[in-house]
Image: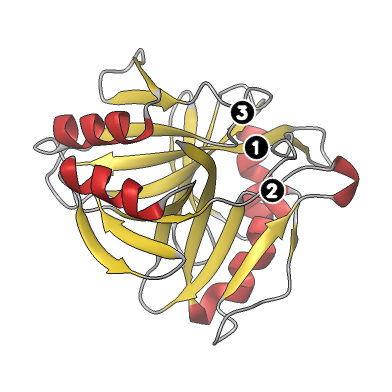
Amino acid sequence: MIRWIWVFLDRPAQRFDDCARFWSAVTGTQPSPRRGAHAEFLTLLPDPALFAAANIKMQAVTGLGGVHLDLDVDDIPSAVRIALDLGAELVANHTRYAVVRSPAGHCFCFTSSSAVTSPSAPATRAPDGTISRLARVCIDIGPADVDVETRFWTLLTGWTSSRTRRPEFARLHSDEQLPVQLLFQRLGENRPANAHVDLATDDIAATAARHERLGATVVQRHEHWIVLSDPSDAPYCVTASDPREV
């Protein structure tokens, strides 16, 4: 069973400080002191007055970076065996975590279960009154892999899958009060799977405009979502989903 889910924003080391300031601002959090052998990690901490659990971390990396998940589990070896039986590949096995590659090529980690007893952080109200929350991780999958990858994550998590009104998307959501849900997007071309984050907001235009002022760039506008890139050019979306729903 997945006890907690962490969203890891992996960002290029040369733009990491800019990205940390940006994601701290748009999520209404404060960056923790940096840690790690090369000061490459930090956690985005909710306001202590909320008594809410953190669920977003950042890592300075070489290369372009991206997004990955850390899944807190009670028994890492057992979780790894289940993932391998479902078609995953073990990338690295460490004492406190294991790196696994999904059938379509998306890397994630199993991590030791932490004693998270606080609820996830609520949606954040911006100075202009709009409300938003980092609500989903969207795994982008080539058409040849979409069925296998969706089945993998559904069986691995034990979560409930559902279709959306658009045939290229499917949802996966937990019945537990976990901070983020999963979304699958079928791409128009075959390539290894990767991921981006989606922020739910009550006003996509106002939220995107605020993000632009904070350093983001609008890439594409759609009726129900806007694609942006953050200060390191990593893509993400603001979507017209209810930010109050967990």
Q: Which residue is mark 1?
A: 133
User: Real-space Cα distance between discs 2 and 3?
Assistant: 19 Å
Q: Along the line of sight, which residue is nearer the eye, 48 or 117?
A: 117
Q: What is the C-alpha distance between the residues marked 3 and 1?
A: 15 Å
Helix, strand, or loop for circle 1? strand
First along the sequence among labels 3 and 1: 1
Give the mark nearer the N terminus: 2 vs 3.
2
- Residue 39 versus residue 71 in the image, above or below: below
Count of marks placed on residues = 3
Which label is found at residue 166? none
Q: Residue at x 40, y 67 (%)?
A: 65
Q: Nearer the viewer, residue 48 or 81?
A: 81
| C-alpha span from label 2 to label 1 | 7 Å
The numbered disc on residue 177 is 3
208 lies left or right of 79:
right
As rendered, which of 216 and 179 lies closer to the eye? 179
Which residue in the protein does label 2 denote? 27
**Quadrant of the snapshot with the C terminus:** top right
The three-letter code of the residue at mark 2 reads Thr
Q: Position of residue 51 (x, y in %)?
A: 84, 43
The answer to the question of whether label 2 and label 1 lie on touching residues, with beta carbons closer than 8 A, is yes
Which coloring applies here?
secondary structure
| Direction from residue 24 to residue 5 in the image, left or right | left
Q: Are marks 3 and 1 in contact (CB under 8 Å)?
A: no
Question: Is 18 placed left or right of 45 in the picture?
Answer: left
* Of the pair 223 and 240, the residue shown nearer to us: 240
Question: Is residue 103 visible in this depiction of the protein?
Answer: no
Q: Amino acid at mark 1?
A: Arg
Crowding at mark 2 (Cα within 10 Å: few <14, some 14-19, many 20+):
many
Q: Quick one: which residue is furthest to the left in this view?
A: 144
Quadrant location of residue 64?
A: bottom left
